[in-house]
Amino acid sequence: MEAEKDLFGKCPYMTAQKVLSGKWSIMILYHLGKKTMRFGELQRQLPDLTQSTLTKQLRALEENGLIERKIYPQVPPKVEYSLSDIGIKFKKVLVELAIWGGEYIETLKDKADRP
Amino acid sequence: MEAEKDLFGKCPYMTAQKVLSGKWSIMILYHLGKKTMRFGELQRQLPDLTQSTLTKQLRALEENGLIERKIYPQVPPKVEYSLSDIGIKFKKVLVELAIWGGEYIETLKDKADRP
DNA sequence: CAGAATCCTGAGGGATACTG
DNA sequence: CAGTATCCCTCAGGATTCTG
């Protein structure tokens, strides 16, 4: 698609940046990294975004190949989201991200303690 | 500042997301991770952004405590940018990010090969 | 050299309402 | 349940120009 044209030949950092630029991308990848989830369940984990926003974010991640969407043809609808292969590999980044994020929050507290 | 209020108490992932949301944050951190640099030198490494944009991105990173700005009071001006302590710790994330970004680009090529 | 000051624009995110 | 379809609106990013 168009996304591929944009990303081709770019450096890994810029590529990563693009894919992760969605406001909720990281959170979604984190939750799907724990387990495959249905739309509703995922939404309950992320109370701060609306259905429409969640849908858009999921579509974007799917188009970029990070997650997979499995539709069960039944009524009522059932749709499961899970990490793709490359999505699973992203977990390693998430681990470091979590560690660093924790450290970062600590530095903020320190600043607040002695102003 | 206001940034602290926003970030306080949030999960590490959301915190990280906020700090890295700048379009060029990762690239800048990567370059400054290699060495301390002056404004002009940094700009030469990143030919795709204008001075004003680079300035804004640097200000944002500085406000978030990721980089440090050292001003030499002389004429013509000399300003050096470097990673702060917490900025240095971010290198670990960058490493994983680079690896994953490379893998991701590979998956794109695979898709292109057999459409 | 390393910026500050303006101005502008688009797209990403959100709110709301409707549906198979 | 898991979406679509609209509308709206902010604001990050960029272009441009001027400066100590």
Image (spheres, coloured by chain):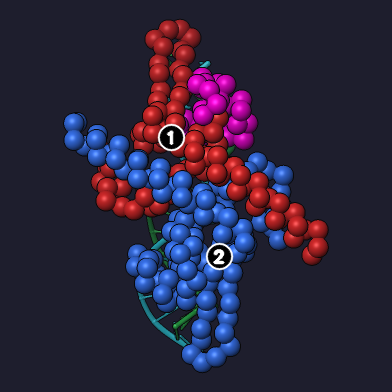
Chain colours: A blue, B red, C cyan, D green
Query: Among all residues in the image, which is located at the extreme left?
Result: A114
Q: Give coordinates of residue A96: x percent, y percent.
A: 46, 46
Q: Nearer the viewer, residue B110 or B37?
A: B110
Q: Residue at x 48, y 9 (%)?
A: B76
The reply to whether the C-beta atoms of the residues labelled 2 and 1 are less than 8 Å apart is: no
* Chain to which the residue tagged by mark 2 belongs: A
Q: How many marks?
A: 2
Chain designation of label 1: B
Residue B107 lies, in percent from the top left, at: 70, 56
Determine whether the residue tagged by mark 2 lies in a helix, strand or loop.
strand
In the rendered structure, which segment of residues is drawn in magenta? Answer: B32-58
Amino acid type of the residue tagged 1 in the rendering: Lys
Name the residue tied to disc 1: B89
Magenta: main secondary structure: helix
Residue C2: x and y in percent read 47, 20
At a point 63% along the width and 31% down the height, the residue shown is: B47
**Residue B61 placed where, x, y %?**
42, 35
Whether residue A15 appears in this view of the structure is: no
| Residue neighbourhood size for the residue with mark 2, other residues' Cα within 10 Å, grouped as few (<14), some (14–19), many (≥20) | many
Q: Are marks 2 and 1 on the same chain?
A: no
Q: Quadrant of the rendered structure where residue A43 is?
A: bottom left
